[in-house]
Every structure is written in structure tokens, then in C-alpha cells.
Amino acid sequence: MAADTKARVKELTEALKNTYHITPGLAVVIVGDDPASRVYVNNKKKACEAVGFVSEEYALPAETTQEELLALVETLNSKPDINGILVQLPLPKHLDDKAVIAAINPQKDVDAFHAVNVGKIMLGEYDFLPCTPAGVMEMLHSYQIPVEGRECVVIGRSNIVGKPMGMLLLHENGTVTICHSRTKNLAEVCRRADILVAAVGIPKFVKADMVKEGAVVIDVGMDRDENGKLCGDVDFENVKDKCSFITPVPGGVGPMTIATLMKNTLKACKLQNNIAD
Ligand code: GUN
């Protein structure tokens, strides 16, 4: 599915180049040397190349100051050939991620993390959808999994996934519950779910006793198990026989996130050049 989306973006990008002589450009900023962030950023750059975008990487040292980072964001805001700006999170602890996100021009905010874009999503009138939740919705659509009227439980309330995920499911008339570390009787709440989205960041957190027979289980986790091997928030082997659908890690939600990022960057380019979608 991610490959299909990227192929579509590639075609549309070629058309844009031929008709308007414009190439979408994405700037990816990474601060420090978090190994997981490095892998994500490399994958984002590779995807840009594959669809025909220009990508610029700004790899800054861990000791970068807030002022330096904000100055880079300002420079990128003013660059006409850069349509999307993505500052990879998490940032080193001494940096204020909220202030950095607030500094990004909302029209270039292809993560949809800026308050303006978050607000638009709340109102259901958005330019950009947040990449991971949008990737999840695309999977549900593609497999014709209905959301309307069904119990949707999201575990995790992050600004990146949990909160916007709940909102997108709500927009499609799901009955949404967002669970978190203070939720009482978590397993019982999860067992109500027709669609269960795990975004807690705890390896293999979701076990069979938290899953209703026949549920759809979406795993947003990118964790490491006790042997350092990449795994998700769902104990796949333990849960898989109970579900009607389940996404693997790696190779499930992750590629869909990146495919959505490509869609958003193309859209940003069109918006900034007043080209109809
Ligand atoms: N860190 C983990 N996921 C994401 C994402 O979707 N965007 C950014 N900028 N940082 C992240």
C-alpha cells in the first residue's frame, strides 16, 4: 500500500515538473545522534528520492542551541524551493520542541504538528493530516474496515499519534476511547475495541487478554525487545490468532507514515504555488 501511494505521488510529481517546472522540496532536520531517529530520517530521505523530490538534510550536533535551531527553521521558512520542513523528534532534552514546532511556517508543516494545523484537524478542515494517523486510516480504508459506529480504542495520548488518531477515527463516526497510563481497567477497556490502536511505546504491551475475538489491531509501536530486536507495542505472536486483521512491526504502519509524508509534501508544494489539488 505504501508503495502504491508513493507511486501515485511520483506520477503527480512528474506531472508537476512537466507542467509547472516545479520540484517539491523537503528539509529534514535532525539534532544529535539518536540511532532510531537516524534510521527514520534515512528512510524519509530515501522516499524523497524515490518519488522525485529534492530533499535536504540538516544534521546538527547534539549541543546545538535553541537559538541556532530556531535560526535554521527561519532560514528554511524563507527558502522558496523548500516546501516542507520536518524537525525529527525527540529533540535533545535542552531544546524546547514546542517552540521549534511553533516557529515552522504552518504551510510548510508537513508533520501537521503546528497549533494551526492541529486546530484545523480538530475542526475537520485540514490541509495536512498527521502522517502516522493518516497512514492508519488509509490502511482501514484500503481493507474496507468500517469505522462508523464501532468501538475504537487508542492506547496512548501523544500529540504525534494518540490524540490525532482519536480525532480521525471520530471524524469517521467511530466511538473513540483514548487510554493512557492512568486508565483504570485498561485490559477491560481494550477488550471492548473493534479497532484497537496501540501507540504506547512499550514493547509487546498488548497481550491476547486485551483483545476481543475478531478485533482489528493496529500496532504503531517502534520498540526494541529484550534482545534489542525491533518490535511493536503488540505481542504479535500472542495476539495474532485472535484478530481479524493485525499490522506487523516492522513493515506495517511505519512505511505508511512515510508515504503520507510524501503526500503532504506534494500538497504543501501545490498550496505554496497556488496549484489546485
Ligand atoms: N518522531 C517520531 N515520529 C515522528 C514523526 O512523524 N515526525 C517527526 N518530526 N518526528 C517523529
Image (tube, grey):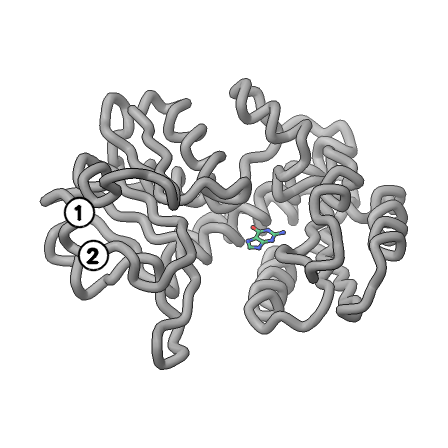
Q: Quadrant of the C terminus?
A: top right
Q: Quadrant of residue 63?
A: bottom right
Q: Is residue 18 visible?
A: no
Q: Are marks 1 and 2 in contact (CB under 8 Å)?
A: yes
Disc 2 target residue: 207
Q: Position of residue 58 (x, y in %)?
A: 78, 63
In the displayed structure, 90 sits above or below 34; it is: above
Circle 1 Cα neighbour tier, 10 Å, few/some/many (<14 / 14–19 / ≥20) = many
Circle 2 Cα neighbour tier, 10 Å, few/some/many (<14 / 14–19 / ≥20) = some
Q: Position of residue 32 (x, y in %)?
A: 71, 69
Disc 1 target residue: 211
In the displayed structure, 231 sits above or below 240; it is: below
Q: Position of residue 14 (x, y in %)?
A: 65, 49
> In the shown orientation, is residue 263 left or right of residue 211?
right
Residue at left offset 70%, top offset 35%:
270
- Looking at the rendered structure, the secondary structure element under dot 1 is loop
